[in-house]
Image (cartoon, helix red, strand yellow):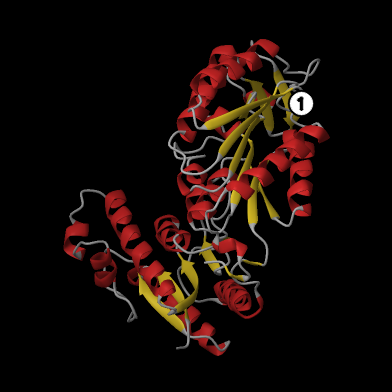
Amino acid sequence: MNRRIAVIGTLDTKGPEIAYVAARIRALGRIPMVIDSGILGTPGISADITREEVAASAGRTLASILDAGSRGAAVELMQTGLTAIARRLYDDGEIEAVLCLGGAEGGLLGAAAMQALPVGVPKLILSPSASGRREFGPFVGSSDIVVMHSVIDILGINALSRSVFDNAVAAIVGMCSWGGGLPRSDRPAVGITMLGQTTPGAMAVARVIEDAGYEPIIFHANGVGGPAMDDLVREGLLSGVVDFTLSELANTIFDGIHATPPERMTAAPIAGVPTVVVPGAGDFFNQGPLGSVPDRYHSRAMYHHNPVATLVRVQEDEMRTLGRMIADRLRGASGPVEVVMPTGGLSLIGVPGGPIADASADRALLETLRAELPDDVVLIERPESVNDESLGRFVGERFIALAARSSRPSRSSRPEQLR
């Protein structure tokens, strides 16, 4: 079977443009599969998978989606259908990549399909919404989606649109032809969370576990990295986790810039992979430029991290909340879990004498962990700071010991394609 490139778009408004892109894919030696994500209007060209089929994959008829009550509700239902179709086509070996042309709603429809596919599958959204002061989280999620600015609206075939469309097609075909493909490893892969404020410690962990034959994979704990790591645990791509940086949880308490959903840090315990947790960078949450920090935080210790980021101290009562949050998310673990608490400081700026140092707040976190962690989760207290070389080595060694005790088979420990 020749696998095809799925081309997603609303064929009532972008029929000629989708037809042009499909022809360019054929000209470059690949086979397109056109999927109609439209809801209103009449398709301008024929689709390989119709909008009615998309609706049916969501368990609905197109008429019922049209009667959903709002444009947003209809889009969400079509996203469900596209997600199901994309995953089925990929799992059945029918598609090798996804390309979407769309505006705001059209791009989000394509994004839903792409986010259902594994890391390494080529994915590209071409949209006029890929510009300006916009949030790209809904487009990208925790996946490896390429978002390309169309410069002009996707309406009409002209000198400018042809140039942009041709580049988009060349990019997706190039990824199919010469890209790295799905992750492969001949070593067990271990996820490690890190920020700039925990880099020295995380690097020490990575060195230890790599020397022991593991492949460390570092995730930037910026509100996307942690959830991405959790997703890969659920996909079976990671043999273990060293959750070394928990600023995402601290951000969640305040709805900070790096806040994450409530399932953050639950995937590894549920999956039963060996897990070591360190509350690195749990002593601050993220805000924007210094001048934009709300007045209610001005009495706190703050650190001007860079022109667009300010780190704000988490105080004593909130550190207790963080401790309870950690305990709750580790509850019911089906595999070995340990928490290592560095009492000498949780970040580069949180060590004694540092700009956000607060020993009583850090002590509140420790006391809460002592009281609230489940009985099957081991708490280890260490005198170093999170970034001391000796602390990183210790954490790496603890992970290796837990992995030796764990009998859970790992797909990522075998020299095969990870999917």
- The percent position of residue 358, horizontal first and vertical second, equals 70, 13
Q: Is residue 17 visible?
A: no
Tell me what residue is drawn at x 72 percent, y 42 percent. Answer: 396
Please tell me how crowded label 1 is: few (under 14), some (14-19), or many (20+) other residues with Cα within 10 Å: many
- The percent position of residue 387, horizontal first and vertical second, equals 78, 32
Relative to 60, 218 lies left or right: right
- The percent position of residue 121, horizontal first and vertical second, equals 54, 69
Name which quarter of the figure residue 249 lies in. Answer: top right
Toward the viewer: 282 or 272? Answer: 272
Toward the viewer: 26 or 248? Answer: 248
**In terms of secondary structure, where does tag 1 sit?**
loop
Toward the viewer: 31 or 22? Answer: 31
Q: Which residue type carries mark 1?
A: Ser
Tell me what residue is drawn at x 32 percent, y 58 percent. Answer: 80
Tell me what residue is drawn at x 62 percent, y 22 percent. Answer: 293
Q: Is residue 351 visible?
A: yes
User: Is residue 353 positioned above or below 174 on the image?
Assistant: above
